[in-house]
Image (cartoon, rainbow, N blue to C red):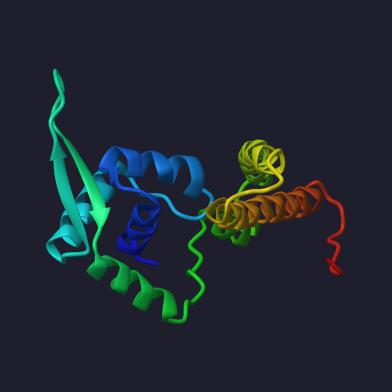
Amino acid sequence: MALAHTILTVLCEKDASGYDISKQFEETMACYWTASQQQIYRELARIEANGWVRCQVVPQQGRPDRKVYAITEAGRRELSQWAAEPSLPTPIREDLLVKVLGGPYSEPAQLLAEVRRRRAVHAGQLASYREKEALFRSHPALPLQEQYRYLTLRRGILFEQEWIRWCDEVIAFLEGQPLDRDG
């Protein structure tokens, strides 16, 4: 997935500044896409040059002018064309998996501590996602956009649950318990 398409998707909902887009990433897309403010601003300049967004400068008193971006018809066509393309799974690049693979050549206590730490990180993220899920569940008649947003949150929840489950298996193995090969 290209950052440009993620930004265009955000702008389909409403016009936004680079800062607003960055906040949207943090609040609703962190479970599947991250980007720094710097990356977002750089991409906004590129997609503006492509004609996919237009920028309106809004003067502010006592602060720098605010640039508000809106998706153009060309941007909507680009997003539609991209959405019609088949998607491929994202390749995994995960340091912890390499550490586990190298387990026979490292200190078991260090590996156990690292897996426990990562389990805690995933448990914390899962708790955060569960809080957001509770907000969705408290509104039984969600607007269509929020229903789709909930589906992406669900994927994040399942991702974190699976990480915790795997960490538990590794911890059990490192503590000398046999592997459950049936899953």
Of all residues, the one furthest to the top in this rendering is 62
Expressed as whole percent of the image width and height from the top left, the position of residue 3 reads 33, 59
Determine the residue positioned at 30% across, 73% down.
77
Q: Which of 135 and 182 is in front in this view?
A: 135
Above or below residue 151? Residue 182 is below
Determine the residue positioned at 14% across, 18% down.
62
Q: Which of 107 and 147 is in front in this view?
A: 147
Q: Nearer the viewer, residue 88 or 72?
A: 72
For the image shown, how many numbered marks are present on the structure?
Answer: 0
Above or below residue 68? Residue 91 is below
Expressed as whole percent of the image width and height from the top left, the position of residue 144 reads 57, 56
Q: Quadrant of the C terminus?
A: bottom right
Is 91 on the left-hand or right-hand side of 119?
left
- Which image quadrant for residue 7? bottom left
Expressed as whole percent of the image width and height from the top left, the position of residue 133 reads 67, 43
Is 108 on the left-hand or right-hand side of 169?
left
- Which image quadrant for residue 134? top right
Above or below residue 69? Residue 71 is below
Determine the residue positioned at 48% across, 69% down.
90
Is 153 on the left-hand or right-hand side of 64?
right
- Which image quadrant for residue 54? bottom left
